[in-house]
Amino acid sequence: MTGWGIPAVCAAACLAFAATGRVAAAEAPASSGLIITRQALHAERLAAGEATRGPLATDVAIQSQDRLLTLSGGRVDLAISRHGFIALGDDTDLRVERVPFSTFDVDLRTQLRVARGHLRLVWKYPDFGARWPMVIDAGPFRISVTSGEYFVEHRDQRTLLCVAEGEAAISTPGQAEAAVFTASACYRLISGAPAQVAAVAPEGFVAARAARALLPLAMQIGLAWAETPSVTATAAMTPDAPGAPDPSAAPTPAPPRSLAEARDQALREAVGPAGRPDATPATPAAARPPPAAPEVP
């Protein structure tokens, strides 16, 4: 082999190894990752470093910088090792910003971004002593969660968060301190303003799980986008209960029950206050003096 032959062979081998590595990363087996697809219906995946997306298969390990998209009527279920799962609704765009290689990774931080659509997360903090932060980004909001169950829906620059169990800390860029949101409630997150909150009964979360959507629940509890009045505004618009009647006010007469009674009531109103105790009694016509005769010049 000539002197030029050995470098050429090495270069070809390196290129083949690199190509094999990209294919392996694109279709990593389930045993090599922490987030694994368990169900994929009408869904696509844009693998990290790839230019085109393809159908999302089951039992595939999801890598950092992967992008998962569901079409109309689609859904995806992802297992997070033995510590939880993620459920996506239709018309959803989820970007996996970061996922650890294994539970032995030095940094276990897992970061997801809901660019559009619906995500449900069930998460159990590991009991092997390692610190495993779980973060969901939606719009300008960063949602850090503890063990529990969470629903996030982000559409048209509007963000809803429901906490069925657990606690979530919400922060935005430039915010000095995160706000903590507790369970059994939904929150409409508003940038630069306090979140609007409404309590949710357990059956409300049951319906949200089945629908893989939060908008029907949000409409029921008054948190459905900007067109629906907020909980506070709705309470302010509710009319107060009627108070006790003013004893000094004149009683409101009952409506007449017959035509004759209506005629008599109209006549009494035309005559004036003759029937009231404080009225000056009218002089009978017979007792009135006759009119004076005109004076003759």
Image (tube, rainbow, N blue to C red):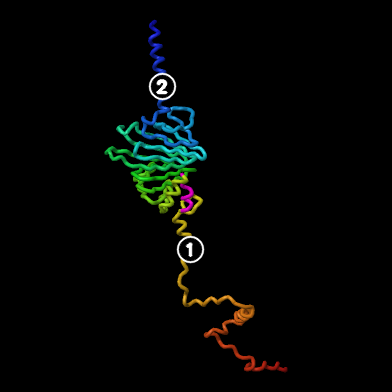
Q: Is residue 74 visible?
A: yes
Q: Is 230 in front, or is 134?
A: 134
Query: At numbered mark 1, what does the secondary structure look like: helix, strand or loop?
Result: loop
Q: Earlier in the sequence, mark 1 or mark 2?
A: 2
- Comparing 19 with 107, the one in front is 19
Q: CB under 8 Å between callouts 1 and 2?
A: no
Q: Which residue is mark 2?
A: 20
Whether residue 270 appears in this view of the structure is no
* Amino acid type assigned to the residue bearing label 2 in the image: Thr
Q: Residue at x 28, y 37 (%)?
A: 130
Q: Position of residue 290 (x, y in %)?
A: 66, 93
Q: Secondary structure at mark 2?
A: helix
The quarter of the picture where the C terminus appears is: bottom right
Which residue was labeled with disc 1?
A: 239
Q: In the picture, which quadrant includes the N terminus?
A: top left
Residue positioned 40% across, 14% down in the render: 11
The magenta region covers 212-220
Q: Position of residue 144 (x, y in %)?
A: 36, 42
Q: Which one is closest to the eye, mark 1 or mark 2?
A: 2
Horizontally, is 270 left or right of 183 in the view? right
The picture places residue 37, in percent across and down from the top left corner, at 42, 35
Residue 191, image x and y in percent?
43, 46
Question: Hey, which quadrant is residue 279 in on the image?
Answer: bottom right
